[in-house]
Each structure stands twice: as C-alpha cells, then as structure tokens.
Amino acid sequence: MPSPRSADHPAVSSPQRDTVDSLISQTRRLRGGLDAVRRDTAADPGGADDARLRWQRALCELAVHQLDDLGRHLGELREGLPADHPETDAETSRAGTAPEAGTAAGAAAGSGAAGRAAGGVEATGGARTGRGSLLSRVGSAEWNLLTDEVTWSDELFRIFGRDPGDGGLTLDELPSWVFAEDQPILTGMVTDCLVDGKPIDGEFRVVRADEVVRTIHMAGEPVLDDDGGTASMWAVLRDVSELRRSERAVRESRDTLRHQQRIARTERRLAVEAREAVLPPWRGSLRLPSGDGFPGAGPAAGGAALDLAAHCLPSESGDRIGGEWYDALELPDGRTLLSVGGLTGHGVAATCGMAMLLGAVRGMAVAGIEPGSLMGRLNQLLAVSAQPSLVGAVCGQYDPRTRTLVWAQAGHPAPLLFRQGTGRPLRSPAGVLLGATAGAAYAQAEERLEPGDLLVLHTGRLAREAEGATERLLTLAPRLTAARSPQECVRIVAEAFGDEPRESDACVLIARVAGTGA
C-alpha cells in the first residue's frame, strides 16, 4: 500500500486524511477477517456439497480481489490522486461490501444462475444479480473433460456477449476470442490446471462478437474423479474491464503529474538561475558611489554616498519565481542608479523579461538618460516586445554631491523616506504601468535628502496589498531609523514580512545617506 503523503504535498486537508486513514484501517480489518473465512472454506466440512463449497471459495477469492483493489485505491487517494473516473467510485463502493457477501454462506453461496451453474445449488438468499450489481460481472463455467460438456452461467454469457442458445465456448474455442498476445497466458493457465492440477489465477482480454474488448480475471481449480485424475475444470470469470480502465487512468494521471512536476522543477531552476545571473552580484552592505575611477565623484570630494542593502523574500509556496528585481549601480558621472520593479507572471518567461528590462534600464542610465525619459523609453520597448506584459517600476538617480534624488515611477508604490524616527512616502509623479498605454508620458520628481535619511524601495508584494505593505513599513520607522546599518534594516523588514502569505516573490532595497565627508 502506498506510503502516506509527505508534508510538502498537502493535497487533502487533515480531516479528509483522517477519514481516509480510518477507511484504510477498516479495510485491513475486513481483509484479516476474510482470511479466517477462507481458511474455513478451505477445510473440507464433510458432507458439504462440492459445488456449494467451490462457489463459496470462489466468492472468498473474489472478495479478496475486491478488498485488495479497495485498499490500493484508498492508498492512492491518501497520496492525493483524484478519482476522476465515475465508475471507480462505484467499483470501490461495491468492493466494500464484498466481504459481507463472502461471509454470508447461505446468501451468496448459490445466488441466481451462477449458483445453479456451479452444481445445481438453489438460491438461498437475496444476492442481487441486476445490471448494476457486482455479481452481474461475475460468471462461472465448468468444462467436463469426460463428456466434453460445457456449462456456463447466464452472467458469463452476458460478459462475453454471447447468445446462450449458441452454448458456452469449449476450451479449444476460447483462445480464438482472446487477444493474440494474451493467448499464451490462457493456454499456460489451462495446461497447468489440467495437467499439473494447479489452481487458475490470471487475466486475459477477449474481443466479443460486437468488437467490444473486455478484460477477464479467471480463477478456478481442477475437479478430480475418484481415481485422483482431472475430470473437469471449474472457474469463476470476473469482468474487470472498468476497474482496469480506472487503474490505467490513475497511472496516466500519476505519470502526467510527475511529468508536470519535473517540468515545474526544471522551469523553477532556470528561473532562479536567470534571476541570479542578472541581479546585482553583491551581497550584504554596499557603498555607492565608491569614489574609484571617477574624479570628484566619491565621498572624498565632499559628497554624501549611499550605504545599500537588499533582499528577496520568497513567495508562500516558494516555487513561484516572478520577474521582480532590485538594482543599484554606480553611473559614470558619479551618480547612483536605484531601481526596483516587477513584471506580471511567473516562471522563465517572467525572469527573462525582467532580464531584458533591467539591462535596458542600466544601459539607458549609463547613457545619461533621466528617470522620466527612461520610463517612457521602457514603455516603448514593451510596446514592440514579442511577449507583452505589464510592469510596475521605480527608477531613481541619486547625486551624492547635492544629496538629490530624481525619480520616476510606473504604477508602483513610491519610495518611503524615514527621517528622525518617522516615515512617509515620497509624493509620486504621474506614471502608469509600463506596457499599459502606448505613448504614455512619465513625469519625474526631485527630493533633497539629509545625512542619515533612509530610503526604502520595495516591489509592492511584501504583503497581499501594496497599501498594506506601505502602512506596515511605516510602523517600523522607529526601529529602522535606529538601526546601525541598511543590512540590519533588511533583517527587520524580513522578520516583519517573512511569514506573509505572498503569491509571488518580493524585493526590498534600502539606502541610507552617509554623513558628509564620511
């Protein structure tokens, strides 16, 4: 029986899982009780009618198969696989009552025509043989080797789609109805039974005269004469076509699920690799501009640089890698580029789109394009993109010599400014989502900063609602302004939003204005 489903695949809720576990336990108890009944029927009761005893044993074996099938299906249900074939439930439901039929010796022993075919036993109970019942898919047959007489039950004629007036198939005729690849199976079972006296237990497929294919499970035994020779062969034949179809559907569903999981794992790996390849390579704190290579650009020239830290918070499921980014880049003229944003969608397509946009942002910023114009050109780029998408973004350029931030936004939460224990969002310039309107214009705003000021830029998905994220960040003002470094600020934000049920990843970029001449 399949093992219980692991915690990383919570397909069913805990109450449902408890119910299925209870059903599995009941099935096991029934299976144990049925084994005791089988042992009783295996012993010769002395004076009991041989046909009745054979039929009881056959019903026990049938109940064994039904309970085993039920246990397997319950195990698969426990694994979280859907039972998407309506006949599976009916088959399983009827299987649950099979042990009772097997233990009701009088009721099930000779029900209907099957009982009469098993040796003329009269019906003693109310076992149903209608179209929808279990016994309507179970028939019996006996092939007498001494008289060449063939006896089939009415149910077996219905299973084979054969007119009772044509008589039952002989052992020589039966293989012609069987699939070519299954004929050796049937031949081997019959030979082992007639020659070696072995019981029959196996399956084969038959093609009826109406071209309907049925899968038949055959269980039987030799009937010996007084000298110990084989006088006839007796068997119970069960139509298991619907059950096997259901099992194939379950296997195909499982294979499809596993294939989809492999694809999802591969896509996630590619998405992570793509994002890691384009996001800034630095980890921990960083100071920009560095003052290296650009005369008069760095703090040594009297400017106020930015101390930086950033972090990505994963989604609730951990596997929905989106197109969110953060970036900080030293520009040739000594200014610092700050940007955050995110594309709609998830997976490789979103991360590849993010890589394209981030490359464009960096290229245009290095070329000296101001944030407002930069946003407009990004919007034009998305308008001609092969895979249109909507993008929210903030792009700013900070001049350390004047401590001035010039920035623009596209349908995105404004940066938050924290100063002396309080925080507020910056006043947003006009700008719609990138990719929403062709030819849209983007304004830009300017903010003069002071030494010690803290800027927090985030992608808006720290919480389910971007407004909620902004309000919660503002409540952290005393802790953020008292923090010793941007890296400590990142840890504070990660602790505050770490358990948030996000539908996608979220990025946060924190910049603190260093003291003049630091």
Image: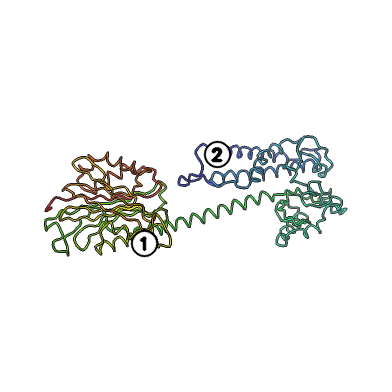
Q: Where does the image place residue 253, in percent across and percent down from the top left?
A: 57, 52
Q: Residue at x 22, y 61 (%)?
A: 331
Residue nearest the observer in this picture, 116 or 384: 384
Residue nearest the observer in this picture, 446 or 20: 446
297 relative position to 254: left or right: left
Amino acid under disc 2: Asp
Amino acid under disc 1: Leu
How far apart are the alpha carbons under marks 2 and 1?
56 Å
87 relative position to 48: left or right: left
In the rendered image, the residue lying farthest to the right is 147
| Residue with the mark numbered 2 | 21
Of the two numbered discs 2 and 1 in the rendering, the one whose residue sits closer to the viewer: 1
Mark 1 closeness class: few <14, some 14–19, many ≥20 residues within 10 Å: some
Q: Where does the image place residue 227, in percent across and percent down from the top left?
A: 83, 50
1 relative position to 37: left or right: left
Q: Where does the image place residue 71, in percent across and percent down from the top left?
A: 60, 43
Q: Which mark is residue 381?
A: 1
Mark 2 closeness class: few <14, some 14–19, many ≥20 residues within 10 Å: some
Q: Where does the image place residue 358, in percent across and percent down from the top left?
A: 32, 59
Residue nearest the observer in this picture, 337 or 132: 337
Q: Judge whether 254 appears above or below 129 on screen.
A: below
Q: Judge whether 451 appears above or below 291 on screen.
A: above
- Helix, strand or loop under label 1: helix
Residue nearest the observer in this picture, 482 or 384: 384
- Helix, strand or loop under label 2: helix
Q: Which mark is residue 448?
A: none
Q: Earlier in the sequence, mark 2 or mark 1?
A: 2
